[in-house]
Image (cartoon, helix red, strand yellow):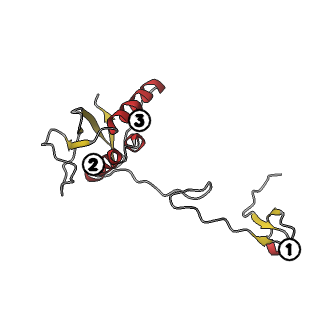
Amino acid sequence: MSARGQDVIHHCVDAHGNPVFTDQPCASQHATPVRAPAPAAGIVLPGTPVPLHRCAATTTVLRRRVIDAFAAHDPNKLAGLMLWRGYGDRSAVGDLRALTQLVRQPLLSIHFDDGPAIGTTIPAAPPLASALRLRTESGDDARFDVAHRAGCLWLRYDD
């Protein structure tokens, strides 16, 4: 005999204020349905669909997301643009620490390949790129390879 999962579980409150969970409509249990409160802006409740975050398919989108990561001082946003392949625990932790240090600095310029550096404004038609270079206020330069995978552009540490 196989078990079949319930399609819907109704959350109700009976006449005495006790919670009731049933596979039957609340009215059939002489209970009142409980409506889940609307989530606060930006809060995702368990079991609710999470909006898809599409990958960067163009250099314009990749550049914008790198700029956004720096503006938010958020190493996780920058890490989300990385292609994490073949990493051990220690090297990944080291790279995350480096990204944390990097995004703490104001971003002065960002450019692809060996072309001229441009500020953080986005040009109309960016080139197809194989590398991304960043310069921060401290004068530090960072270079990432740009990997093209499955229609997406990903950052990798310069090999």
Q: Comparing marks 2 and 3, which lies closer to the viewer? A: 2
Q: Residue at x 22, y 49 (%)?
A: 120
**In this orientation, which residue lies closer to the viewer: 42 or 91?**
42
Question: Relative to 146, is 54 above or below?
Answer: below
Give the SS element for disc 3: loop
Q: Which label was assigned to residue 30?
A: 1
Figure quadrant of the C terminus: top left
Give the SS element for disc 1: loop
Amino acid at the residue labelled 3? Trp
Give the SS element for disc 2: helix
**How far is the residue under mark 3 from the one under mark 1?**
54 Å
Q: Comparing marks 3 and 1, which lies closer to the viewer? A: 1
Q: Which residue is mark 3?
A: 84
**In this orientation, which residue lies closer to the viewer: 83 or 30?**
30
Q: Position of residue 158 (x, y in %)?
A: 28, 31
Amino acid at the residue labelled 1? His
Classify mark 3: residues with Cα within 10 Å, few (<14), some (14-19) or many (20+). Answer: some
Q: Which residue is mark 2?
A: 63
